[in-house]
């Protein structure tokens, strides 16, 4: 699911003016559950428009955009299209928005060993860059397990697998992953945030949840949502995870303490996105508010915490 905010006529005209383009067509992008995104067609090009749904300030949002400019020489990321006023982020009324270049290709839907090696290389390069050059990154992720679980508990709603979810949360909530090596992480490195063309990764998108956190969280997201979710045989799953970690380590060596907590990090990341979907579905009722819906049920992720 995706769209929370519908563009009105005056807003479209402002976008045309501020970016000096003529909009021929606008399409909703129905992936993701945290921002509103649109595909914009002009006569000659395509762009992606992001409308920010978070309550971050402009400085926090611009941190991500500056990061993208910095890593663009070694990671295939979208180019930020600055406005006629030279701004990363424009405002119109209550809306804050950014325009990005469109990356050619299709959303990743077929995962094989080659693609896993490519994402391992890019993540390793990204984390290594952060480890060597970035000492702080002044923004927080909105993906907050403790917040979601607190809100779900306060709501007293009933749902499938409630007892299991809260039991696992009790096991994990006091484990301090912040003692592990940290830097800038993507924090939402799902397959639908990767664009492929001719069988290779052509773009990694949506760094909007990136923040300064344990590298192991990004590793856990890939292991969960690229490999474990596929329910391969035990041996194939083991081989794919080992190959992914080995290729990642060619750019940033994984520490022993990270390996020790990796399985628990996988469970925490699985639980985090289960809780996120539960919160959006049951508390915010976001699936009902969205203009275009591709429902992402928490139930499809339960197998990751078994």
Image: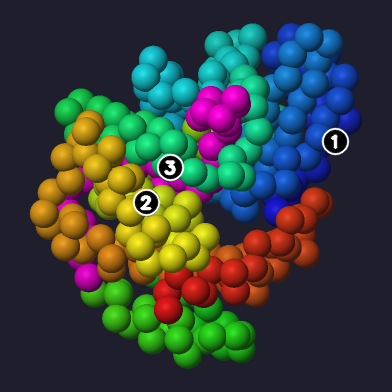
Q: Is residue 136 left or right of residue 41?
A: left
Front in this rendered view, residue 135 or 87: 135
Front in this rendered view, residue 305 or 144: 305
Residue 121, percent from left and from top: 33, 32
Tag 2 or tag 1, which sits nearer the N-term? 1
Residue 98, percent from left and from top: 61, 27
Q: Nearer the viewer, mark 3 or mark 1?
A: 3
Which quadrant is the N terminus positioned in? Answer: bottom right
Tag 1 or tag 3, which sits nearer the N-term? 1
Tag 2 or tag 3, which sits nearer the N-term? 3
Q: Is residue 176 magenta?
A: yes
Sort mark 1 into few (<14), some (14-19) or many (20+) by Cα contacts within 10 Å: few
Q: Secondary structure at mark 1?
A: loop
The reply to whether discs 3 and 2 touch (Cβ–Cβ < 8 Å) is yes
Q: Secondary structure at mark 2?
A: helix
| Residue placed under numbered mark 3 in the picture | 113
Q: Residue at x 66, y 33 (%)?
A: 106
Give the numbered dot on residue 8: 1
Residue 2, percent from left and from top: 70, 49
Q: Is residue 303 magenta?
A: no
Marks 3 and 1, how far apart at CA: 44 Å
What range of the chain is rendered magenta? 175-202
Give the numbered dot on residue 82: none
Residue 53, percent from left and from top: 61, 46
Sort mark 2 into few (<14), some (14-19) or many (20+) by Cα contacts within 10 Å: many
């Amino acid at each position: 699911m995706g769209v929370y905010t519908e563009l009105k006529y005056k807003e479209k005209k402002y976008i045309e003016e501020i970016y000096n383009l003529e909009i021929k067509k606008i399409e909703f992008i129905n992936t993701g559950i945290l921002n509103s995104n649109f595909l914009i067609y002009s006569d000659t090009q395509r762009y992606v428009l992001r409308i920010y749904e978070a309550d971050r300030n402009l400085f926090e949002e611009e941190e991500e955009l500056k990061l993208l400019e910095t890593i663009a020489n070694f990671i295939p990321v979208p180019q930020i299209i600055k406005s006629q006023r030279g701004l990363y982020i424009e405002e119109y009324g209550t809306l804050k928005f950014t325009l990005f270049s469109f990356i050619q290709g299709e959303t990743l839907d077929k995962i094989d060993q080659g693609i896993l090696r490519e994402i391992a290389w890019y993540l390793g390069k990204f984390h290594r860059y952060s480890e060597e050059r970035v000492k702080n990154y002044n923004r927080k992720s909105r993906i907050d397990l403790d917040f979601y679980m607190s809100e779900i508990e306060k709501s007293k709603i009933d749902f499938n697998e409630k007892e299991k979810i809260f039991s696992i949360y009790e096991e994990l909530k006091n484990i301090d992953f912040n003692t592990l090596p940290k830097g800038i992480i993507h924090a939402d490195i799902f397959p639908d945030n990767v664009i492929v063309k001719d069988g290779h990764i052509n773009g990694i998108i949506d760094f909007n949840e990136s923040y300064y956190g344990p590298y192991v969280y990004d590793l856990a997201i890939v292991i969960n949502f690229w490999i474990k979710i596929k329910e391969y045989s035990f041996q194939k799953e083991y081989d794919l995870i080992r190959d992914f970690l080995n290729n990642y380590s060619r750019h940033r060596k994984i520490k022993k303490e990270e390996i020790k907590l990796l399985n628990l990090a996988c469970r925490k990341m699985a639980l985090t996105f289960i809780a996120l979907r539960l919160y959006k579905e049951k508390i915010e009722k976001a699936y009902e508010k969205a203009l275009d819906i591709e429902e992402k049920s928490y139930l499809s992720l339960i197998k990751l915490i078994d």
